[in-house]
Amino acid sequence: MKQKTSILLVDDDPQLIRLVRANLEPAGYKVFIAMDGPSALAVFDKEMPEMVILDIMLPDTDGYELCQRIREFSDVPIIMLTAKVEDADKVKGLKLGADDYLTKPFNVEELLARIEAVLRRSEPGEEAKAPRAVTCGDISVDFIQHKVTVQGREVALTLTEYKLLAQLVKNAGRVMLHRELLSKIWGDEYRDELEYLRAYIRHLRQKIEKDPHHPQYILSRAGIGYLFACPE
């Protein structure tokens, strides 16, 4: 029998907790509950859930801070719940390491679809088909160990950041279309979510480029896509 995927739901709204739990558990998920930041960290440490669904508005610690703290020690997929609809708020969560966001109010079918999509793209890919490692200039990517180094120093990437960089490096010298990258990294249902891609490209440039505002490796092709360039 397949073990249930465990999810930590962090929210202080009892009605929403009941709704989500009543739908996730019949769908085959094991749900842990926390209603504030300290409880969430305690439950996470004890249960080691495979996903976190995190409300931005919490009574003591906001979801952004909690997301950032989780990212200090874990790459577990995180979906943020927000009552805010401004792109800046959504991008802030992505910058801090969230994998997806869902705006309240939402329907349960959409939540289930997002959970499945995030879990699917967090699964290990077919690394056996890839070369063990690729070096371009100062950057080396080890596809077996999922390790990235810049000038010999290891760079910490989230799982999504690593997958995006690995996809670009494996196709070095070829322009990858926006929708192509979105489909490969996030799934077909995200083909039009260009802001996701832009946010993560910014993350990567800040971590691997000497000057993120004048990148040498991850190059933009306006209106088309991105190219990973290897110096000659």
Image (tube, helix red, strand yellow):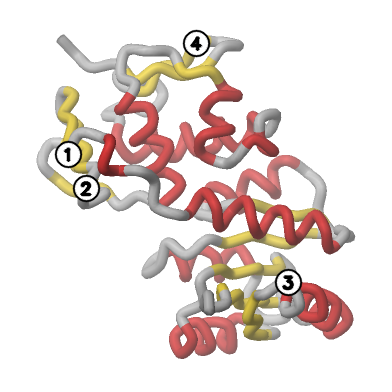
Determine which of the numbered discs, if any, sits on residue 27 in the image: 3
Front position in the image: 191 or 128 = 128
Q: Residue 168, relative to residue 106: is it above or below?
A: above
Q: Quadrant of the C terminus?
A: top left
Element at badge 3?
A: loop
Q: Residue 198, relative to residue 174: is it above or below?
A: below
Element at badge 1?
A: loop
Front position in the image: 142 or 230 = 142
The Cα atoms of the two marked residues, 4 and 1, are separated by 28 Å
Q: Earlier in the sequence, mark 3 or mark 2?
A: 3
Circle nearer the viewer, 2 or 4: 2
Q: Is residue 231 left or right of residue 41?
A: left
Circle nearer the viewer, 4 or 1: 1
Q: Residues within 10 Å of mark 1 (few under 14, many from 20)?
A: few
Q: Residues within 10 Å of mark 3 (few under 14, many from 20)?
A: few
Q: In percent of the image, x 69 and y 42: which residue is there?
A: 88
Q: Residue 67, relative to residue 18: is it above or below?
A: above
Determine which of the numbered discs, if any, sits on residue 221 in the image: 4
Q: Earlier in the sequence, mark 3 or mark 4?
A: 3
Q: Are marks 2 and 1 in contact (CB under 8 Å)?
A: yes
